[in-house]
Amino acid sequence: MIAPLLVVGLLVAAFVGFNIGGSSTGVAFGPAVGSDTVSKTAAAGLMTTFALLGGYTVGKNVIETMGGEIVPPSQFSLAASVAVLFFVGLALLVSNLFGVPASTSMTAVGAIAGLGVATDSIVWPVMGRIVSWWLVAPIAAFWVCAVIGRYLYPYLDAKVPLDSAGGVIERRYAGPIPYPARAPGAALRDVVGVVLVVGIACYMAFSAGASNVANAVAPLVGSEAIRPNTGVLLAGGAIGVGAFTIARRTLDTVGNDLTDLPLLAALIVETVAASLITFLSVIGIPASLAVSATMSIVGLGWGRATRTTTLSEAAGAAMAGEEPTAKARVDALAADGKGAGGDSAEARSVPRIGEEDPDDLAATELFDPATTGRVIVLWIMTPSISAAASFLLFEYAPVF
């Protein structure tokens, strides 16, 4: 007979997985949905499938780290595991209600760290290694995409034009079974672009599962209440439920409110963020897909916008205490992706750095500062809430 407390633990783990699905689906498929590549329902189905795959393969490394390396496995009594998971789920629920893709890994590790500090059992070298990667990952994502935006993106946009996803793929039926097919008049290059964007979004879902499945079940696995494979199935199923329900708000935030991404930009952002998170998951680091993906977006746009000024001009202005003559515009990236790379020589021509007119880059805004600020505030709040609540509980509630 299953103990009542274990039932509660499984329900809380499912609750956490539900909120992970709500948060991570927006990060993984927000650019694809925002560029009209896939629908929200299709994104949810793909998210469920590939998150399970990522959790079942690479994700077990992260489960091992969070279930027994940040604090000793002996600290994860069943009651303690339930309490940790509850705080993770509560913090993520707050974030999802605001429609912001939360840093799930930071939230989960914060709750475990609160337990470790309260019981004086935290393994500081492991915690330090995790926090170090938390600092390195978003910086790396920003600068990799900034370099791409400044030096490569305009040439890619000119040579590999991906106009839009709308009208490229249509649904057809073989009897009662639907299948995707190229729409009449759709260019082959646009079909290839759509396939690439969906493929990379699935790659991001894989990396989200690899990193985030542990956040829902690591304490229960650490306490040996459930086996790792059982935990992966439980978390993956709950992520799927969240993807089909609460994720619709975070899909809107990442896909529409935070940024207006051209198809090519979405492809670059997804590739960089997914590769970074998959690498960290392989080495057992619970990393934040939300932070890395959003910093990739901002870095790509910032790098694209800085093409209006050369490095020598910027350095000279800085030494003289003046502002550069040509100012970078935050809406630069959204001006591209309009099929600028057509077949004419003029379309294929890309101005050199320092020769672009900032006014020529104006389109819709790359990112909404108010929305971006809300995202950053929630990134800080959610792990802080889980860590503080966990510490207070284990410090002052002897029953745990």
Image (spheres, grey):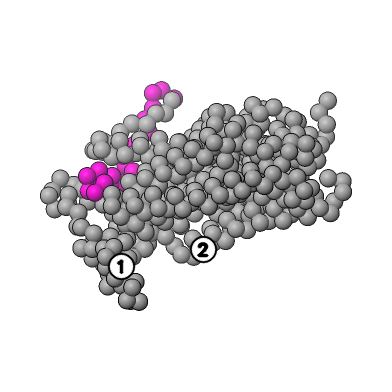
Instruction: Determine which residue is flagged by label 2.
Output: 373
Expressed as whole percent of the image width and height from the top left, the position of residue 35 reads: 38, 48
Expressed as whole percent of the image width and height from the top left, the position of residue 217 reads: 67, 36
Residue 283, image quadrant: top right
Which labelled disc corresponds to residue 314? 1
Q: Looking at the image, is 147 positioned above or below residue 38? A: below
Which residue does the image show at 77% across and 40% down from the upper left? 75
Helix, strand or loop for disc 2? helix
Which residue does the image show at 74% across and 36% down from the upper left? 73
Ranked by sequence position, the earlier of labels 2 and 1 is 1
Does the CB distance between marks 2 and 1 fall below 8 Å?
no
Which residue does the image show at 32% across and 42% down from the upper left? 167
Q: What stretch is highlighted in magenta?
A: 155-176
Label 1: how many residues lie within 10 Å, few (<14), some (14-19) or many (20+)?
some
Q: Which residue is the extreme one toward the left?
A: 345
Expressed as whole percent of the image width and height from the top left, the position of residue 305 reads: 32, 61
